[in-house]
Image (cartoon, rainbow, N blue to C red):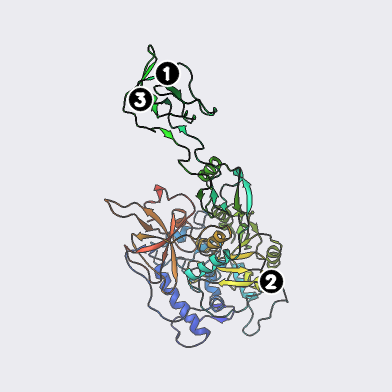
Amino acid sequence: MTGSDGPHPEPGSDFRSAGPASERAREEEERAVEQALALVGGSDRIGGSGRSGGRPSRSQGSQGSQDSQGSQGSQGSQGSQGHQGDQDSRDENPNPGPSSDPHARRSSDSPSCDGHDNDPRDGRTTASVTAAATATAPAPGSEQPPPPGRATPGDPAKPRPSTPPPSWNRARAIADREGRGGPAATIRLPLDRALGHVLAEALGALTDLPSFDTSAMDGWAVAGPGPWAFEAGAGLLAGRGPAAALPDGTAVRIATGARVPPDTTAVIRSEHAQVDDARGLLHARRSVVTGQDIRPRGQECRSGEQLVPAGTVVTPAVLGLAAAAGYDALPVVPRPRVDVLVLGDELLNAGLPHDGLIRDALGPMLGPWLRALGAEVSGARRLGDDAGALRDALTSSDADLIVTTGGTAAGPVDHVHPVLDALGAELLVDGVAVRPGHPMLLARLSPDGPYLVGLPGNPLAAVSGLLTLAEPLLAGIAGRPAQDPYRALVHAEVHGHPHDTRLVPVVHRPGRAGGRDHVAPLHYNGPAMLRGIAAADGLAVVPPGGVRSGTEVEILDLPWAPATPWTEGCFT
């Protein structure tokens, strides 16, 4: 097989020698390890290899494995979209066939590709794409630079320094730091438009709550000891002005929320009162305690008291509290604006896959997911494999963040890096030591321009990129406070990558017989699959080497309701 810089080494070649051949041999070894992981998911054994040595650089790995991607990566994960058969049966089949990822040629998760723990560098499998890759790949030593200032289709990405990618924790910290790098803007929105925004300032009460003594129940306001004389009539209703003072030994009917008359001792609930209409007297069926069923002024808060801090997400309950405290509008941080650019000529918007074309899974998924993270998202734009269209879209965007899907590797139609280079963008994160999603990136187009998060094309790898880079970046831009890590017991032994963090879909389970709640790993967790994440309510952060059953792991919650009961069974 040949890639963009020559033939692959034969299996068993000496990977200890220096140079590109050494790097490719290490790819083959890592591929073998991770193909074994592909068969188990969360299981009863610890996986991982004790292999030492550096990981191939992004450019070396991508150039050295182009053809293997073509045979293993494409059309892999339309779990619910028609090309799932090979991947679905992977747990039962020790020799899985070609993967079927809808975005795999742009989901270059690692130099190795096994359809489970790693994304291929370039995964298109159709004959036309393979031929195009072969035709456009330059001969060794004959690579020509792209025209100045512009990347063009067919140009491979420039080789990049072979520095190891940052750890998963480091990459998230960089994204969080960038999101919080400047002061957040503040706008005032009326209550009916503030839902889901983040408070830019602490919310202080504009009045005492309640602002006067009120009755907590329908019943009788009484003064002094009983029995109490009363007069027939409607009594005191909510929304009326102040009433006259109540003399000792008297009672008056009162409604919930009505002002309590001055000198009232207590409110007696209707069901606890006995009325003698003939004599005009009220008797209490139970003992009366001074102040019972009266909400005194300022019981909930005093004017000026902080109700909720800055950084609080405006929920329906916060809106109700703000209204009760006297607000008509709230100071909030504008929602981050996000543009979504879907790359790839092989993607269909509707219908069944056919003739080498596959359904776009990421376009329909990313918009709602980003909105759930608090962003204002424009409709997904499908650009195909067009470097010029990508450059125009980047330079014309007025968003705070641009999210691209696929094209982050170094294949002949992977244009993200060349276009970013041509625009002089600053690469803040270029690859992350995480599986799936290794080739994700974070860039800043200009000091005052938008950020760009480049997601791999494999669907679960794209989810990994969302939670690793986009989520902390958006949280910072939106003014949300950083969250403390949440940890839970994992109820299985989960295989790990030899060197990288793994993100594994999990579902929460209640403890039994007084046991602790825990999470269970789900099957169908390969980078090209969505079936596992669709049943999940979180992702477990599995350190290199894996974890044993009963180990606490960090959990990334997903921004929707917990998993439903149908996730039992074949998923766990």
Q: Quadrant of the N terminus?
A: bottom right
One can see residue 78 in this view? yes
Residue denoted by label 3: 225
Local packing at callout 2 (Cα closer than 10 Å; few below 14, some 14-19, many 20+) is some
- Which amino acid type is shown beneath numbered disc 3? Pro
| Residue lying at the far left of the rendered structure | 513
Instruction: Farthest residue to the right: give it.
Output: 148
* Tags 3 and 2 touching, CB below 8 Å: no
Residue placed under numbered mark 1 in the picture = 230
Find residue 449 and report its image quarter: bottom right
The nearer-to-camera label among 3 and 2 is 3
Label 3 Cα crowd, 10 Å radius (few <14 / some 14-19 / many 20+): few
Q: Residue furthest front?
A: 248
Mark 1 neighbour density, 10 Å: few (under 14) some (14–19) many (20 or more): many
Classify residue 354 by image quadrant: bottom right
Mark 3 lies on a secondary structure that is loop
Q: Which amino acid does the dot numbered 2 rest on?
A: Leu
The kind of residue tagged 1 is: Phe
First-in-chain label (2 vs 1): 1
3D distance between C-alphas at marks 3 and 2 = 84 Å
Rounded to the nearest angstrom, the CA distance separating label 2 from label 1 is: 84 Å
Residue at label 2?
A: 423
Can residue 107 be seen by looking at this rendering? no
First in residue order: circle 3 vs circle 2: 3
* Residue 204 place in picture, x, y as percent: 54, 48
Identify the element where label 2 is drawn.
helix
Instruction: Work out whether mark 3 precedes mark 1 in sequence or the reverse, and give the earlier one.
Output: 3
Q: Residue 422's spot in the image, x, y percent? A: 69, 73
